[in-house]
Amino acid sequence: MTIDWAHFTPWASLAGGLVLGLAAALFILLSGRVLGISGILAGLLPPRPGDRGWRVAFIAGLLAAPLVWSLFAQPVSPRIAAGPVVLVVAGLLVGWGTRHGSGCTSGHGVCGLARLSPRSLAATLAFMATGFATVFVVRHVIQ
């Protein structure tokens, strides 16, 4: 295994993790809710009275953040080594998994582990094991 030093960004990754952790902590302290993106999005369908505004604002903020970032820094071009069909199938599988796992990586991996939730520990271990196995199969078995 080698490290792609040209694209190795430990400081940006650390900063992103700190901002995400701070946002999750503030969200639970100020609203009493867990910062899980899939749960926030799922709560829009069907919308509950008085619960829609903050969810729409949150999703709008997620979509607007890259646009705001591009005002201050050079946009990053994503490097995706998969075709559109693979991306759609992967997105559907992730969506299916978040519904069956009662949450996503942000809800379980960031917030749930911070609350010492056994269910979130099991879910996060399952996410990670599946990811490791998928990378192994794609890189060493299929190719």
Image (spheres, rainbow, N blue to C red):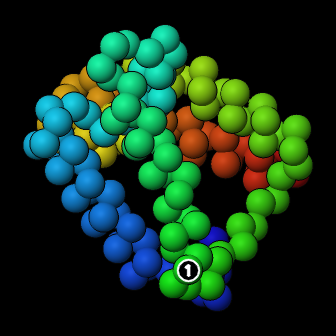
- Above-or-below relation of 123 to 73: above
Q: Is 85 situated left or right of 66 in this image? A: right
Residue 97, quarter of the rendered image:
top right
Q: Quadrant of the N terminus?
A: bottom right
Q: Nearer the viewer, residue 115 or 141?
A: 115
Residue drawn at x 11%, y 43% is 29
Q: Residue furthest bottom?
A: 6
Let me know if residue 117 appears in the view: yes
Residue 125 in the image, given as x and y percentages of width and height: 39, 35
Q: In x, y percent, where is residue 126?
A: 45, 31
Q: Residue at x 49, y 11 (%)?
A: 46
Identify the secondary structure beneath mark 1. Answer: helix
* Nearer to me, 72 or 16: 72
- Name the residue beneath numbered marker 1: 71
Q: Position of residue 53 (x, y in %)?
A: 37, 32
User: Which residue appears farthest toward the left when viewing the image?
Assistant: 29
Task: Give residue 112's quadrant in the image.
Answer: top left
Local packing at callout 1 (Cα closer than 10 Å; few below 14, some 14-19, many 20+) is few
Which image quadrant for residue 109? top left
Rendered position, 92 above or below 136: above
- Which residue is drawn at the image coordinates 53% and 58% (left, top)? 64
Q: Amino acid at mark 1?
A: Leu
Total numbered badges shown on the rendered structure: 1
Is 83 or 40 nearer to us in this picture? 40
Residue drawn at the location 55% of the way across and 80% of the way down: 71
Asked whether residue 8 appears in the rendered view, the answer is no
